[in-house]
Amino acid sequence: MNTINEVKSISGAKGITLTNVAKYMTEHSGKKYTIDSLSKKLRADTIRYSEMKLIAQALGMELVFRDKV
């Protein structure tokens, strides 16, 4: 699954729109995010790790690195 579909799937399951995610990112980063700019970054896989952390926070989640089992 690619990045945009993964984020859409999680946000949909949580009942949070990408518009709300973009608003959260704007409020917590000092940078302006719109639904269009966020979607473009997710589609092109040009999203930064710091932005993915903000997305996770907006969705009530955290990014975790763990060893493969």
Image (spheres, rainbow, N blue to C red):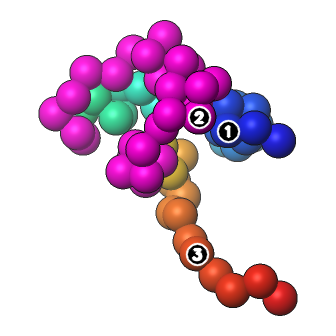
Which quarter of the figure has residue 37?
A: top left
Asked if the residues shown at circle 1 and circle 3 are in contact, with their CB atoms under 8 angstroms apart, the answer is no
| Residue position for label 3 | 65
Q: Residue at x 51, y 26 (%)?
A: 41
Q: Are marks 1 and 2 in contact (CB under 8 Å)?
A: yes
* Residue 57 in view in this figure: no
Give SS at disc 2: loop
Quadrant, the N terminus: top right
Query: Residue flagged by tag 2: what amino acid is it?
Result: Asp
Residue for point 28% across, 29% down:
26
**What span is colored magenta in the figure?**
28-54
Q: Quadrant of the C terminus?
A: bottom right
Given residues 21 and 42, the one toward you in this image is 42
**Would residue 19 appear left or right of 12 to someone viewing this image?**
left
Can you identify the residue that label 2 sits on? 45
User: Residue 3 has which mark?
Assistant: 1
Q: Position of residue 50 (x, y in %)?
A: 36, 51
Residue at left 47%, top 47%? 52
Of the image marks 1 and 2, the number of the one nearer the N terminus: 1
Packing grade of label 2 (10 A; few <14, some 14-19, many >=20) is few
How would you rate the neighbour count of disc 1 (Cα within 10 Å): few for under 14, some for 14-19, many for 20 or more?
Answer: some
